[in-house]
Image (cartoon, rainbow, N blue to C red):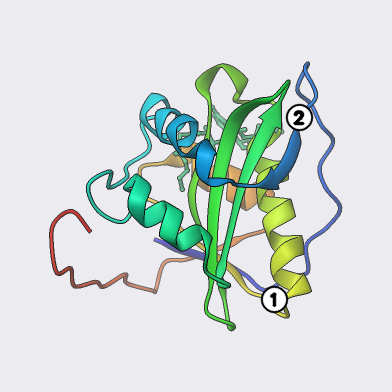
C-alpha cells in the first residue's frame, strides 16, 4: 500500500499531550530507546538488517536522512526515519511509545518531516503502510495523504533481514 501526498504541509497540529513534547533530529545515542519503542509499539522492523544500531548510525550521517524523534521531559517517545531521493520523501519507522499514543505525537513528527523535506525542495511525501494497519491509514488520511490502490509494491531483497 502506498500513500502519496503532493500537497504542501499545513500548520503543525496542536500539541495534545498532557506533558509537552518537541521534535528534534535523532542522535546516535537515541538508538536504544528508539529500538525499544519500535518493539513496544509492535512496529515491524529489521533489527538484524537495515534497522541495526550500526546501520542506523551510518544512515544518520547521510545527507538524504532526516531522522526525527519526539522528546518529552528528556525522554524519547517517538520516531520517524525519513529519507529522500531528491524527488520524494519517504516516511519510515513512524512509532510512538504506547503510553503516549493518541495525543498528536505522530502527527507532529509527520508535519515536521514535511517541513524539513520542503526546505530541501522535496514536495512529495510518501509512506508504505500495511493494509491491515487501519490506525496508521487513518492517521495519514487525516493528514491529507491519498491512498493509491492501483499501485503495487514490488521489492527484491538480498537477504531476509533486509
Ligand atoms: C500509528 C501511530 C504512530 C500513531 O501515533 P499517535 O501519536 O498515537 O498518533 P496521533 O495522536 O498523532 O493521531 C493522529 C490521528 O491518527 C488516528 N489514530 C491514532 N491512533 C488511533 C487509534 N488507536 N485508532 C484509530 N485512529 C487512530 C486518528 O485519526 C488520530 O486523530 P484524532 O486523535 O484526532 O482522532 C501509533 O499508533 C503507533 O506507534 N503505532 C504502532 C506502529 C505503527 O503502526 N506505525 C505506523 C507504521 S506505517
Please name the residue that numbered disc 2 is placed on.
21
| Residue 27 in sight from this viewpoint | yes
**Location of ligand 1 given as a quarter of the image:** top right
Quarter of the image for residue 132 reads top left
Q: Which residue is located at x 18 percent, y 68 percent?
A: 157
In this image, 54 relative to 89: left or right?
A: left
Q: Residues within 10 Å of mark 1 (few under 14, many from 20)?
A: many
Provide the secondary structure element on which disc 2 rests: loop
Q: Nearer the viewer, residue 87 or 81?
A: 81
Please name the residue that numbered disc 1 is placed on.
123
Q: Which residue is located at x 57 percent, y 76 percent?
A: 88
In this image, 60 relative to 68: left or right?
A: left
Question: Which comes sooner in the sequence, label 1 or label 2?
Answer: 2
Q: Which residue lies furthest to the left in this view?
A: 159
Q: Distance between the residues labelled 1 and 2?
A: 26 Å
Query: Where is residue 70 shown, x and y percent of the image?
Result: 66, 36
Disc 1 versus disc 2: nearer the observer: 2
| Residue 90 in sight from this viewpoint | no
Quarter of the image for residue 155 reads bottom left
Query: Where is residue 144 shown, x and y percent of the image?
Result: 69, 57
Provide the secondary structure element on which disc 1 rests: loop
In this image, 124 relative to 156: left or right?
A: right
Query: Where is residue 147 shown, x and y percent of the image?
Result: 51, 62
Q: Which mark is residue 45?
A: none
Quadrant (top left, top right, bottom left, bottom right) of the N terminus: bottom left
Indicate if the residue with disc 2 has its beta carbon within 8 Å of ligand 1: no
Query: Where is residue 77 shown, x and y percent of the image?
Result: 59, 28
Q: Nearer the viewer, residue 23 or 132?
A: 23
Q: Above or below — where is 3 with respect to 87?
A: above
Q: Residues within 10 Å of mark 2 (few under 14, many from 20)?
A: many
Q: Which residue is located at x 25 percent, y 53 percent?
A: 49
Amino acid at each position: 500500500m502506498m500513500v502519496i501526498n503532493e500537497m504542501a504541509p499545513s500548520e503543525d497540529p496542536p500539541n495534545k499531550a498532557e506533558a509537552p513534547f518537541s521534535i528534534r533530529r535523532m542522535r546516535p545515542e537515541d538508538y536504544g530507546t528508539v529500538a525499544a519503542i519500535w518493539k513496544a509499539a509492535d512496529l515491524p522492523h529489521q533489527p538484524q538488517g537495515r534497522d541495526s544500531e550500526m546501520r542506523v548510525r551510518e544512515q544518520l550521517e547521510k545527507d538524504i536522512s532526516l531522522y526525527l524523534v519526539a522528546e518529552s521531559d528528556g525522554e524519547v517517545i517517538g520516531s520517524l526515519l525519513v529519507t529522500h531521493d531528491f524527488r520524494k520523501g519517504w516516511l519510515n519507522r513512524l512509532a510512538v511509545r504506547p503510553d503516549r499514543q493518541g495525543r498528536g505525537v505522530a502527527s507532529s513528527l509527520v508535519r515536521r518531516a514535511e517541513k524539513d523535506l520542503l526546505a530541501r525542495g522535496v514536495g512529495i511525501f510518501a509512506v508504505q503502510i500495511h493494509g491491515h494497519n487501519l490506525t496508521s491509514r487513518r492517521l495519514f488520511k487525516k493528514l491529507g495523504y491519498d491512498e493509491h490502490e492501483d499501485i503495487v509494491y514490488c521489492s527484491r531483497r538480498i537477504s531476509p533481514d533486509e
